[in-house]
Image: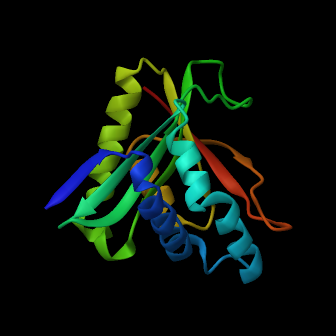
Amino acid sequence: MVEIRKAKASDATHIALLGRITYTESHGDYIEEKEDLLKFYDTNYSVSKIREELNDAENIFWIVFFDELPIGFAKLSLNENFSKLDKSKSCKLQRLYILNDFIGHKIGSQLQEIILKTAIDLKFESIWLTAYYKNTKGLKFYQKYGFQQVGSIDFFVGKTNYENLIFSKKL
């Protein structure tokens, strides 16, 4: 059974661990320096950092369970505009990750629907995200939901730049 609910501060440990695992599953093969990847995790997926983000009113997190196992999460950053996009009221889909073993269950689609509905309910006019250009599975997923590429952005892990594509969708 699938349960998707808004995350709370007590979910920080699960989300931090899921963040590290799912990022490794989706991007780990691309990162040239594994030590840089570990530093990236310490900065972005520490329990304290996730707890801080969960307590920030400008973020909404969801956590996903499958038969009571935590298997994924998402983060929506509210009121986040990107300078190259139009000046509409925007939010950013910061993260959407599901463990590889559960991707075939289409849980990511369920989570995406919840995120888009939330953004619409909150009266946002557009939603945007970034995705690594080699992450073809992720790129196809977002394009399926009507996101269109509108540019690119530099994303550094350590000193290495990993070009990310910027996608946007009108709501």
Tell me the quarter of the picture where residue 146 sits. top left
Of residues 64 and 133, the one nearer the viewer is 64
Please state which of residues 42 and 97 is positioned toward the viewer in this rendering.
42
Relative horizontal placement of residue 69, taking residue 157 as reference (left or right): left
Residue 117 makes an appearance in the image: yes
Q: Quadrant of the N terminus?
A: bottom left
Question: In the orientation shown, which residue stands out farthest toward the right?
Answer: 159
Pinpoint residue 60: horizontal percent, then vertical percent: 45, 38
Q: Residue at x 37, y 35 (%)?
A: 116
* Number of marks drawn: 0
Q: Is residue 33 visible?
A: no
- Res. 129 image quadrant: top right
Q: Nearer the viewer, residue 168 or 13?
A: 13
In the rendered image of this protein, does residue 123 appear above or below residue 104?
Answer: above
Which image quarter is the C terminus in?
A: top left
Q: Quadrant of residue 88?
A: top right
Q: Residue at x 54, y 70 (%)?
A: 20
Q: Residue at x 60, y 77 (%)?
A: 28
- Left or right: where does residue 151 sit relative to residue 3? right
> In the image, is 16 to the left or to the right of 4?
right
